[in-house]
Amino acid sequence: MEEKRFAFFKKPPDKRRQAEITTYLKTRHPRLFWGAIGHSILGEELRYARLGCGKRALLYVGAHHGMEWITSLILYRLIDDLARIEERTGKPPLPEDHSLYMLPMLNPDGVEIELHGAAAGGPLSDRLVRQNGGRTDFSRWQANARGVDLNHNYDAGFCAYRVKEKEAGITGGCPTRYSGEYPFSEPETAALAAFLAILQPAAILTLHSQGEEIFYHPVSPPIAGADALGMRLARLTGYRLGEADGMAAYGGMSDYAAEGLRLRAYTIECGLGQNPLPIRDAPVIYRRLRRALFLLPTLL
Ligand SMILES: [Zn+2]
């Protein structure tokens, strides 16, 4: 009889649902290695699952942004699928010298606040309401629990962005696009930057929503193979390949990985519609991305 699959795409991944998902994954795949790169402001572990133990690392990161929790579900489902292949074949579906790190949620506090409102902010809840313009509706919340947009908190064009931020009227913690006091001021981005520096991944995919686009940050001199890999990813997903512009072109993880560390890093804007994308879009997005997520290790 065929095993009933865990329904990853049934509920948004709040803290409670994530506990269910990780319990399932740990029980179903006891060989899978789990670790954490650090903790969020409110003390949540920033967990990853790793497949393979080769020296050449790859990294997938989900949910930098509160409204974009659908990307975590995509990565949880991927972990399950890849671990199943490993069990079936006796080895991870990666070239031998590779390892794949999958970090489904970099911003667990922001996701919890987006899903459950200011109360999820614990001791920060009053300030969160102020940062949200006095509103109790947090359904458009992208930032972390201090009102910092994590994907503008990396050290890439930080000063130049500050000017644009001021022009846009952003002067402090708020639902989206505030870059923080200084680069890596937030524990989530500081933890990921330290992890990147140690791991030096051969390629990084960071999943956001939405737009069906893939962005990367060209640098001079160009990073060998960065264009070609971007084009392969675009072909495999059917998403459009482009360069970020406007405010989106500053302070992001893939900007920093390319500019600061000269790593091949791509921002994948999953799905199409209005954030937060409805959960019913998750299986469609997964089908669209699966080949790229599965095959990336073989494309390097
Ligand atoms: Zn995003």
Image: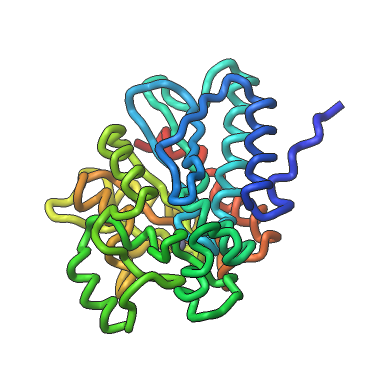
Q: Is residue 270 among what the camera can see?
A: no
Q: Quadrant of the C terminus?
A: top left
**Residue at screen point 45% across, 55% down:** 64
Q: Along the horizontal axis of the image, is 159 left or right of 225?
A: left
**128 relative to 32, above or below:** below
Q: Quadrant of residue 57?
A: top left
- Residue 237 in the image: state x and y as whole percent: 50, 53
Report which quarter residue 7 is drawn in.
top right
277 left or right, relative to 3:
left
From the image, which quarter does the N terminus lie in? top right
Q: Residue at x 48, y 80 (%)?
A: 133
Q: Seen in the image, is 144 located left or right of residue 180?
A: right
Q: Which is more toward the observer, 232 or 64?
A: 64
Here the colouring is rainbow
Give the percent coordinates (x, y) of residue 84: 64, 27
**Could you tell me which residue is drawn at 46 percent across and 27 percent down?**
94
User: Horizontal and vertical percent for residue 90?
Assistant: 58, 15
For the question of whether residue 73 can be seen, the reply is yes
Please report the residue visible at 31 percent of the width from the left and 33 percent of the height from the top: 199
Residue situated furthest left in the rendering: 221
Q: Nearer the viewer, residue 201 or 177?
A: 177
Quadrant of the displayed image that contains ligand 1: bottom left
Image-based side of 184 in relation to 275, left or right: left
From the top left corner, tell me how far across and down residue 251 is, in percent: 28, 61
The residue most toward the top is 90
How many marks are shown on the rendered structure? 0
Q: Is residue 122 above or below residue 229?
A: below
